[in-house]
Amino acid sequence: MALGKLLSSQESGALGRPRSIWSTLHLDPILLALLLLLVGGGLFVLYSGADRNFAVVEGQMIRLGVAFVVMFVFAQLDPAIFRRWAPWLYLAGLAGLVAVLLVGVGAKGAQRWLALPGLPRFQPSELMKLVVPMMAAWYLSRYYLPPTFSRIVVGLVIVLLPMFLIIQQPDLGTSLLVGMAGIFVVFFAGISWKLITAFFGMVAVSAPLMWFYVMRDYQKQRVLTLLDPQSDPLGAGWNIIQSKTAIGSGGMDGKGWLQGTQSHLEFLPESHTDFIVAVLAEEFGFVGMMLLMAVYFLIILRCLYISVTAQDSFSRLLAGALTMTFFIYIFVNVGMVSGLLPVVGVPLPLISYGGTSGVTLMAAFGVLMSIHTHRRMISA
């Protein structure tokens, strides 16, 4: 009898109240409102960054529409489904990465896409940003936490294998994002500070080896350009110099929408993709940048709340990793555009023009909403 009342309460909501429309749709209204605010503002900036080309904005609106549909679909799925399918998705992702190396489509010196008959061209590496943390969370959550050393090693192998395949394309930026997504899962699983210190020590020791035996010439040039962009102001240093000029010229409140000179006079390259934050800083100034960072901060804060309130280890590890991956997107893009990090081709999330990365991000937000709205409501 009591169990029947409890189950009835779970179906209708806490304390027997009728479920809200948001619970029925499995959407988080706060996170959804923040995402719509971010996307809406981003379209205005994109219109300026694309030099008033409405066709670019229209294409982005279609992509974002598809991305929101993907988010809605993922939000309907119970987290148990993600847990159940994680190993198979991981194996399929690895197969896709191998297929890219064998029969992938190349562009601009890189081979990163698959063009299957009847399907649009896509990047399997983008999907791994979601699948790798899902797989790592699936593996580590099967055992008691914190994990033993041997299980940490297995978790790192799960992360490093797709990283290695993505680096071969080559795509250093995506490989770093995939790696960080998986490593965050291992970190949140609860490892000792001794192991963390040892890990960073190994990274520091292996840095010279990576420089001489792993990194390609153009990747080395990006690091050298970061240290001294004036060494080649009309070549490798051009992007960073023009980007910093655009950011600095914006001042406190900017030059005004559509009034940016660096982008509209075509000094700033990739102004509607990787360097779109420089357009925003030039036209809206420090105030505009702070408003953008505030929206990002609120999104991250809401996602961290969802992570903390998740009701099982798999959901907590996955939600935390997806949240921090979103933060890394922002940190790397803003850092490289402002000259604090090397240029690695990471777009500004949900602002830069692009398709696959936006869909992947919205799928991740759909997973977060699923974790939050599928919680079992138990009341006294």
Image (tube, rainbow, N blue to C red):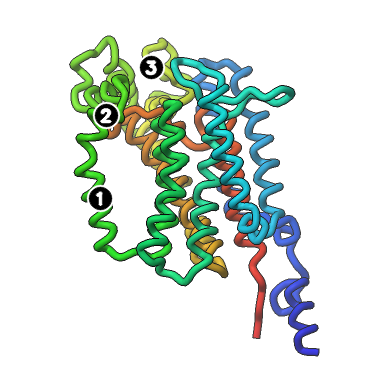
From the viewer's perspective, is 175 left or right of 103? left
- Which label lies toward us, 1 or 2? 2
- Per the image, the residue denoted by label 1 is 200
Q: Would you say residue 280 is visible in this rendering?
A: no
Q: Would you say residue 276 is visible in this rendering?
A: yes
Q: Residue at x 39, y 24 (%)?
A: 255
The answer to whether the residues at label 2 and label 3 have Cβ atoms under 8 Å apart is: no
- Per the image, the residue denoted by label 2 is 213
Q: Nearer the viewer, residue 67 or 360?
A: 360
- The disc label shown at residue 22, or none: none
Q: Is residue 327 above or below residue 2?
A: above
Whichever of callouts 1 and 2 sits on the residue coming sooner in the sequence is 1
Instruction: Indicate the position of residue 219 as horizontal and vertical percent values.
Output: 31, 25
Q: Quadrant of residue 345?
A: top left
For badge 2, the amino acid type reads Tyr
Q: CA distance from mark 1 to mark 2?
A: 19 Å
Whichever of callouts 3 and 1 sits on the residue coming sooner in the sequence is 1
For badge 3, the amino acid type reads Leu
The answer to whether the residues at label 3 and label 1 have Cβ atoms under 8 Å apart is: no
Q: Is residue 182 above or below residue 286?
A: below
The answer to whether the residues at label 1 and label 2 have Cβ atoms under 8 Å apart is: no
Q: Is residue 316 above or below residue 204?
A: below
Q: CA distance from mark 2 to mark 3?
A: 33 Å
- Which label lies toward us, 2 or 3? 2
Q: CA distance from mark 3 to mark 1?
A: 36 Å
Q: Is residue 8 above or below residue 153?
A: below
- Per the image, the residue denoted by label 3 is 268
